[in-house]
Image: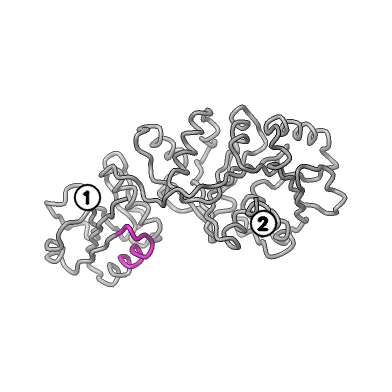
Amino acid sequence: MENVIVAIYSNDLDYSLALGEALSLLNPNFLINVTESSQAFKECGQYDLLLLEDDEMVFPDVGRSVIRLVNDRSSAIKNLDSLSFKLFKYESVRSIAADIILYDRLLTGRVAFGFKNKGYKMIAICSCRGGAGKTTVAMGLGQALCRYHGKKVLYISLEEVESTLLYINRREGGLSIGEYLYYLFKDETKTPDQESFMIWDSYGINAFKPDKGKNRLKELNKDQLAAFFNAVTAEGRYDYVLADLGDHFSDESLWMIRQCDKIVSIVSEPQRQSERQERFTAYLRFALGNRVESDLICVHNMNRTKEDATFSFAEDICIDYDPDSIAADGDIYSISIDQDFGIGIKALSQKLIKS
């Protein structure tokens, strides 16, 4: 994409310089011009966007290409219809950069930032029952792919009610998956930039910020799901997309399974669910056909003894019962893959990397 020239003017020069340097390091497509005074700004030449801290200052020639920086988070405004943006100046630089990209996209219609598509792998995480640990395994797997293999990972939840925010800290402000879908289907000629709709954990796993109610992705038909995943992966920014399918299956879920490169089926306490698990296995074999032997991986989660692993797919992975690796900090669960839980998770990540 073309470079975006960003001029920054603030009464605090040190802040302007620090923000300009951080934005430049974060994205090489930003060309930053930090101005020391209003007169210097007027003489700085051409620019695409102006980040302006002083709410009272008016530059008659800038038109709508101004993003105001405010000192109070409660004063922040992001109105996409009127193109009125006021950003909290001490928000994370990644969040500010995402909003700059979004504003520029809305203002100019330019293609969003992104690397050339290098291909990606989509992994389905599924189970025949709730509570099997699908989300925990998915987050642990994403962590291993990021930490030990340097991969860029996107987590997508297709649960009826998402549990994403139990594992990834909430980003204050920002837009949700429902709003992303609104803008995606409002104008199919323009793809909304993902960054403004994202949350992320400390290891780099990205996810769309959930809606407060029902998961809007569950309302999409197959054509709409195809459009969503095409939009999400078009820029090639991810190496792996981990799709948590939940345990409620539909025609859309079956379609999703068929699109995935690998399917990870989570089994927990198999001795208590043998009949249900066998029906689920038959369902997956129907969905995958001849692929079942190569693309289906059974993960025996919360495994207490090796004898528990009684259901054989193409290849099995055992994840030991290890409550010490899952810690609650308020309403957020912290996952460690440095203990027994991580042994199975690392084996799963290595299997996917080699496949």
* Vertical position of residue 24 compared to residue 220: above or below: below
* Vertical position of residue 94 compared to residue 196: above or below: below
Q: What's the residue at 58%, 38% (across, down)?
A: 158
Which residue occupies the extreme right position in the image?
A: 307
Foreground pick, 294 / 237: 294
At label 1, counting other C-alpha atoms closer than 10 Å, the crowd grade (few under 14, some 14-19, many 20 or more) is: many
Give the structural element (helix, strand or loop) at label 1.
Answer: loop
Foreground pick, 49 / 191: 191
Give the residue pinned by disc 1. Answer: 65
**Cα gap from disc 1 to disc 2, whole angstroms:** 47 Å
Q: Which kind of residue does numbered mark 1 sit on?
A: Ser
At label 2, counting other C-alpha atoms closer than 10 Å, the crowd grade (few under 14, some 14-19, many 20 or more) is: some
Q: Residue 13: x, y in percent?
A: 25, 71
Q: Residue 266: x, y in percent?
A: 72, 44
Foreground pick, 76 / 245: 245
Which residue occupies the extreme bottom position in the image?
A: 14
